[in-house]
Amino acid sequence: MDEATLIISSKNYSSWSLRGWLITRMSGLPFNEKSIALDDASTREELLLRSSSILVPCLLHNDVSIWDTMAIAEYLNELRPEAQMLPSERLPRARCRSISGEMHSGFSALRSSLPMNLRSRRPDFKVWSSAQADIERIASIWRECIGIWGGPFLFGRQYTVADAMYAPVCTRFTTYDVRLDETCTGYKDHILALPEMIEWTRAALDEQGEVSELDVEF
Ligand SMILES: N[C@@H](CCC(=O)N[C@@H](CS)C(=O)NCC(=O)O)C(=O)O
């Protein structure tokens, strides 16, 4: 019998936890969640400020431990090909991996100056120019994908790993009141209305504990 556990941290603050959780849900593999250090704000602060150890998400499946979101996505895609987590055609599949990789390794200005914080609302937030460049690049990726594959997801009617990779950005755009064109607003709203996103957001709103560094005004 399969045993799977996904280790995550805060549902309010941890964008990588959200990506890993959406991807594991997408795969259809039944799993338990294990949240670390949710009841200890100072531990959370310390862990969030460390750069390269004890990172979440981490998937434990039978005797295997898989960390890093893209490794989890590739593992689950191999394990459960029927879930079609990547597009079935080679060209969109390559694009899906490219834009997922771009999110995985890039957009550092956006990540650092607009951290995920589902409980917060910052109307008229002043976006710095480097973060604005990241926002424009993301909007252009979304417009291009939706232009080619027709929406409502990035690769048409199929919900893929790329949508999970960009889902935390959708929440940031709402938190920081980022203005978007109609196409990008429609995509963002579609993602935020997914049952999984509603479930995650409800849990984030109920979560106790604040990380003061992430609650200050930037
Ligand atoms: N490249 C990693 C990044 C993972 C990462 O940075 N995770 C952050 C959470 S957002 C982390 O574990 N920070 C420590 C913590 O939250 O306890 C991945 O793709 O999974």
Image (tube, rainbow, N blue to C red):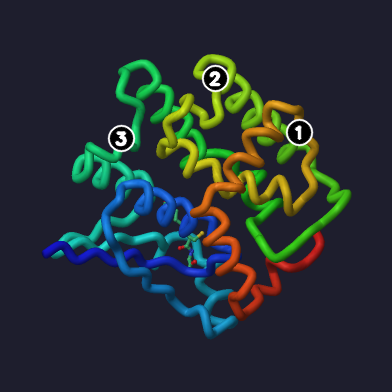
Residue 217 lies, with reference to residue 22, above or below; the image says below
Residue type highlighted by circle 2: Gly
Of the numbered discs 2 and 1, the one sitting upstream in the chain is 2
Of circles 2 and 1, which is in front? 2
Give the quarter of the image for residue 12: bottom right
The tag on residue 151 is none
Position of the N terminus by quadrant: bottom left
Residue at the spot x=20%, y=40% of the render?
Answer: 78
Q: Secondary structure at mark 2?
A: loop
Of the numbered discs 1 and 3, the one sitting upstream in the chain is 3
Of circles 1 and 3, which is in front? 3
Residue at the spot x=32%, y=69% of the render?
Answer: 32
Residue at the spot x=28%, y=41% of the render?
Answer: 74
Residue type highlighted by circle 1: Leu
Return the residue at label 2.
150
Question: x%, y% of residue 115?
Answer: 65, 56
Name the side, left or right, on which 53 lies relative to 178. Answer: left
Name the side, left or right, on which 179 lies relative to 14. Answer: right
The tag on residue 84 is 3
Give the quarter of the image for residue 88: top left
Tell me how far mark 1 sits from mark 3, CA to CA: 29 Å
Residue 113 lies, with reference to residue 206, above or below; the image says above
Question: x%, y% of residue 182?
Answer: 74, 28
Q: Are marks 3 and 2 in contact (CB under 8 Å)?
A: no
Q: Are marks 1 and 3 in contact (CB under 8 Å)?
A: no
Q: Residues within 10 Å of mark 3 (few under 14, many from 20)?
A: some
Tell me how far mark 3 sits from mark 2, CA to CA: 18 Å
Question: x%, y% of residue 53?
Answer: 40, 65
Residue type highlighted by circle 3: Gln
